[in-house]
Image: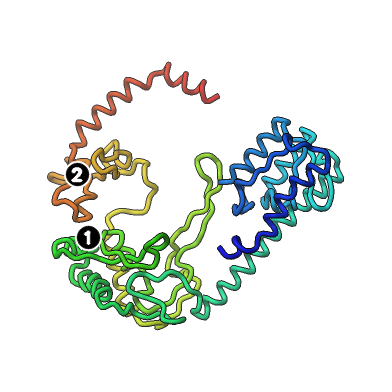
Amino acid sequence: PGQVRFNQESTERQYNQANKAKSMGWSPEQIRILDRDLGQSGARATNREDFKTLVSDVAMGQVGAIFSLEASRLARSNQDWHRLLELCAITSTLVIDEDGCYDPAEFNDGLVLGMKGTFAQAELHIIRARLHGGKLNKAHKGELHFPLPVGLVFDDDKIALDPDQEVQGAVRTVFELFERESSAYAVVQRFQGLGLRFPRRSYGGAWDGKLLWGRLTHSRVLGILANPSYAGTYVFGRHQACKQIGPTGEIHTQSHRMPQSEWRVVIPDHHPGYITWDQFLANRHRLAANRTNCEVLAGPAREGLCLLQGILICGICGRRLSVRYTGNGGLYPIYQCNWKHREALSRHACMNVAAKPLDAAVANRLVTAVTPLTIKLALEALT
């Protein structure tokens, strides 16, 4: 924040490009400043609305020249940069930076601009590698700070137990109940039955850094039991960013939990903990043994007797319905929403719907709608 507030020379130089355009003969009415992407990385076009506006205006031949301090100000992705240059060459749009004026339609000018874009992308890679290397080196020494889970605090540069005895008691109660009940669901039920509350630390806003007490959820219990910090172990690399292609073709970065064997840094007995490392491993094995589902993508149908499993949504709470097999040998499946019951918000499930009549009604509707004519029309629409 201080860098943005007090060091504004670069921003001022960018706005001065408008004066440069005036000095070269463009009138103020012809000059348009695109500044909604300030603070956004040029690594990709996602969430850069003004860059998308620039590309579309250039494609329609509505731009005479693009003024920029340097190529990296427009794009640090070779794909985005060369696409823009290709459109500029077709529509006779000039590119003007601090070094000169370029016509992308000319081979030499296009070659120079292409090299500038390549250097900008390489510079971004070098910066990232240098920063990541420094972070990893600090993590190997156990000195890299990251947000601590509730119950642990920073005492100068060291990690210590929260001095608030009430907070310590709440965290210890979770581990004690799980040791006794062997189930995360049972821990939530006991907390609700005893009228207990669990703290969480707020980040940002007026409550930044303060503890807020509220209801303990099942996902919160799983997060506590899976966090090695409570075992006094310093771990770096539990999550890793991976790029994925979205439905619209855009590339998104998501964080994925890594298996224990792929954690980058593991330093046992780094700080005081609530449980031992052996207890932490035993809790993880117990959670894995309690699972009744495998990790599959949400939505597509799975094996079983039900036609609509994985695609029904509860009309009461909006959660996905699961399938429960009842009767002798599990021959009578039902669709059930048990989210409120699982989170100890209700003694009963939101709804229980017999699967057989619902599957039959949907199947009859599908057979009626899917005819040779509708299939032919659908194929023609695709082609």
Q: Amino acid at mark 1?
A: Tyr
Label number found at residue 350? 2
- The answer to whether residue 275 is visible is no
Q: What's the coloring here?
A: rainbow
Give the structural element (helix, strand or loop) at label 1. helix
Q: Amino acid at mark 2?
A: Cys
User: 111 above or below 287?
Assistant: above
Could you tell whether 79 is left or right of 253 in the image? Answer: right
Quadrant where the image shows the C terminus: top right
Residue at figure coordinates x 24%, y 63% from the top left: 184
User: 41 above or below 258?
Assistant: above
Label number found at residue 185? 1
Q: Nearer the viewer, residue 251 or 353?
A: 251
Question: What crowding class fits label 2: few (fewer than 14 Cα within 10 Å), some (14-19), or many (20 or more)?
Answer: some
Rendered location of residue 219, percent (x, y): 30, 59
Rendered location of residue 59, percent (x, y): 70, 33
Residue at figure coordinates x 22%, y 55% from the top left: 343
Quadrant where the image shows the N terminus: bottom right
